[in-house]
Image: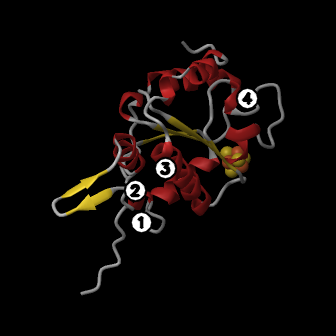
């Protein structure tokens, strides 16, 4: 019976009888990219779109991310979906800080990206005011396909990231700009 299961693409490598060689970065990147564990920080309507993304029709499990974690210590992809009130800011930052490196952040929808339609005194005008964001997904709300595209973008980042990036001065500077040590 024909199978339409698509295997993850192997990294660039040299192979011969009985061996295949590639760089350590590429193997780690391949594993990380296909086993991202999401932590859904869903506060409002965009969270419903995330639920659809997890459901059988869109099936985030196809990308190796079927295991949502509500413990930050066991997640490496923070999905912020919904309006973030300024009062929630410190909680969101604490969740981010409790995640182990390497960690990636997706701002899902207009509210998480920029405050959306809520240009008011009580709403955070984008989560990048308190934590670094890797991928922004536009829309109010974004369709599940767009959320999947955001996850694919994070997969690309994970796949191509140098193992040393998190120790670089540039990365430390980025964290310091958010008062994160
Ligand atoms: S971006 Fe739109 S759909 Fe998403 S949480 Fe904000 S108001 Fe709701």
Local crowd size for mark 1, using a 10 Å CA cut-off: few (<14), some (14–19), many (≥20): few
Q: Position of residue 102 (x, y in %)?
A: 44, 32
Who comes first in sequence, dot 2 or dot 4?
Answer: 2
Q: CA distance from mark 3 to mark 1?
A: 21 Å
The residue where tag 3 is placed is 155
Residue at disc 3, CB closer than 8 Å to ligand 1: no
Q: Of the numbered discs in the image, which one, if any, rests on residue 100? A: none
Q: Position of residue 5 (x, y in %)?
A: 33, 72
The residue where tag 4 is placed is 124
Q: Of the numbered discs in the image, which one, if any, rests on residue 12? A: 2
What's the residue at 38%, 58% (across, down)? Answer: 61
Q: CA distance from mark 4 to mark 3?
A: 27 Å
The residue where tag 1 is placed is 56
What's the residue at 43%, 62% (across, down)? Answer: 59
Q: Position of residue 101 (x, y in %)?
A: 43, 28
Relative to 110, residue 170 above or below: above
């Amino acid at each position: 019976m024909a199978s339409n299961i698509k295997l993850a693409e192997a990294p660039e490598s040299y192979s011969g009888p009985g061996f295949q060689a590639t760089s350590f970065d590429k193997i780690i990147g391949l594993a990380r990219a296909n086993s991202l564990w999401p932590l859904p920080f869903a506060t409002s309507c965009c969270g419903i779109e995330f639920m659809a993304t997890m459901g059988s029709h869109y099936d985030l499990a196809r990308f190796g991310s079927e295991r949502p974690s509500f413990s930050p210590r066991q997640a490496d992809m923070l999905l912020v979906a919904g309006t973030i009130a300024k009062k929630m800011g410190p909680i969101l930052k604490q969740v981010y800080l409790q995640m182990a490196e390497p960690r990636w952040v997706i701002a899902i929808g207009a509210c998480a990206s920029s405050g959306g339609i809520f240009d008011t005194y009580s709403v955070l005008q984008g989560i990048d005011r308190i934590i670094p964001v890797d991928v922004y997904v536009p829309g109010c709300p974004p369709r599940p396909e767009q959320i999947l595209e955001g996850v694919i973008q994070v997969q690309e980042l994970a796949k191509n990231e140098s193992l040393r990036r998190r120790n670089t001065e540039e990365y430390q500077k980025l964290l310091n700009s958010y008062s994160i040590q």
